[in-house]
Amino acid sequence: MTLGDKLRSLRAIEGSLRGLGRPMTQSEVVNAMKQELGRGLSQAYLSQIENGARPHMTNTSRELLARFFRVFPGFLVDDPAGFTRELQSVLRTEDATVDSWLFAGADQFRSDPELARALLTVAENRDSRGALLLLAEILRTPGLDERLGEVLQPGSVTGTGHPPPASSHN
C-alpha cells in the first residue's frame, strides 16, 4: 500500500469516526489539524503526498499527520515491494483496531487527563488487547482491584463515580 493509499484510507476512517458518513476532504483534514493541533499542512502539500508527486515528506509533516490520525509515524510510509496485508495475523489486525479505539477515546476524554493518560498507556502497550483482557480479569476477581489500588497507589486511589461493589467481608 502506498503512502497516498494510506492517507486516503485514514481520511475515510476519520470521516466515519467524526460521524460524517464519508471520508474527510483534504481541506477538512487541513482545517481540523490546524484547529486541533495548532498547526498543520497545506491542502496542496497533502494532495501532492496523496498523489505520489511528493514521495517523501518531512519528519515534522509525518509527526503531525501521525498525531492527527492517531497512528504511529512509521505507518506513514510506502509498504515495501511484495508486502501484503494478508501476512498480518487476525490478532495483529484486532490490536490495531483496539489501539485506534483507545487513541480516539483518549482524545475524546482530553478533559479528564488521568483517564486520557490511562487510555494512551494501554494503547501504547505492546499488547494492548492483552492488557485490556488482563484488566477484565482483575475486575472479575472480587476485591483484587481494591488490593492492587492499595499496593500501587496507597491512599490516592480515586473513585469512578460508580458505587463500590457489595462487600462480602462484613
Image (cartoon, grey):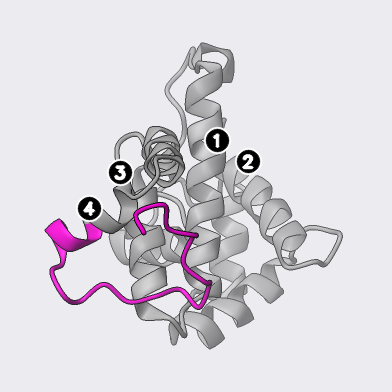
| Circles 4, 3 touching at the beta carbon (< 8 Å) | no
Q: Earlier in the sequence, mark 1 or mark 3?
A: 1
Residue type, label 2: Asp
Dominant secondary structure, magenta: loop
Which of discs 4 and 3 lies nearer the camera? The answer is 4
Q: Which residue is mark 2?
A: 5
Which of discs 1 and 3 lies nearer the camera? The answer is 3
Dot 1 alpha-carbon crowd within 10 angstroms: few under 14, some 14 to 19, many 20 or more: some
Rendered image: mark on residue 61? none
| Position of 110 relative to 73 (above/below) | below
Which of discs 2 and 4 lies nearer the camera? The answer is 4
| Circles 3, 2 touching at the beta carbon (< 8 Å) | no
Q: Residue at x 46, y 35 (%)?
A: 78
Q: Which residue is mark 3?
A: 125
Identify the element where label 3 is drawn: loop
Rendered image: mark on residue 148? 4
| The magenta stretch spans residue 71 | no
**Residue at the right extreme, as displayed:** 21
Identify the element where label 1 is drawn: loop
Q: Earlier in the sequence, mark 4 or mark 3?
A: 3
Residue 85 image point, x, y percent: 56, 20
Q: Which residue is mark 1?
A: 2
Dot 3 alpha-carbon crowd within 10 angstroms: few under 14, some 14 to 19, many 20 or more: few
Place residue 42 in its image quadrant: bottom right
Residue 153 image point, x, y percent: 16, 66
Q: Residue at x 46, y 67 (%)?
A: 164
Residue type, label 1: Thr
Q: Residue at x 34, y 50 (%)?
A: 143
